[in-house]
Image (tube, rainbow, N blue to C red):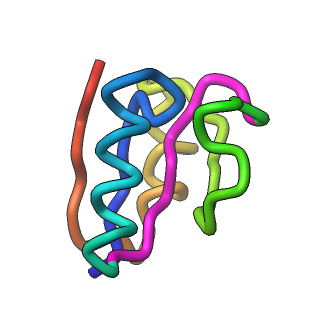
Amino acid sequence: MKIAVTGASGLVGGQVVRAALADGHEVTAIVRSTGSAQLRGLDIRQVRVGLMDGRRMGKALQGVEGLVHWR
């Protein structure tokens, strides 16, 4: 399943990303800035976008089947 995780570069969000990958999901990490040490080396797609930017967020979520929102 293709899922997106907001707050993915944080401690909890990063653990959600790792758990999703371990379960075989394809992950899109929604982050405020790319290059987080928390996500380094993971086979994920990172998208830098603010949660309030509806147009860019919509584009980032294209093709995503599930969303985990962590603030």
Nearest to the observer: residue 54 or residue 5: 5
Q: In the visual, does 23 lie left or right of 61?
A: left
Q: In the visual, does 29 lie left or right of 61?
A: right
* Residue located at (57% from left, 32% from top): 31
Q: Is residue 58 above or below residue 49?
A: below
Which quadrant, please, contains the C terminus?
Answer: top left
Q: In the visual, does 30 lie left or right of 32?
A: left
Q: Which residues are magenta?
A: 25-34
Give percent across and percent down for residue 10: 46, 22
Give percent across and percent down for residue 24: 33, 81
Quadrant housing residue 61: bottom left
Q: In the visual, does 45 lie left or right of 26?
A: right
* Residue located at (52% from left, 55% from top): 60
* Residue located at (43% from left, 37% from top): 14
Residue found at the very far right of the displayed protein: 35
Which quadrant, please, contains the N terminus?
Answer: bottom left
Quadrant housing residue 36: top right
Q: Is residue 62 above or below residue 46?
A: below
Count numbered badges in the picture: 0
* Residue located at (39% from left, 67% from top): 21
State yes or no: residue 11 in magenta: no
Secondary structure of the magenta portion, mostly?
A: strand
State yes or no: residue 31 in magenta: yes
Give percent across and percent down for residue 45: 62, 61
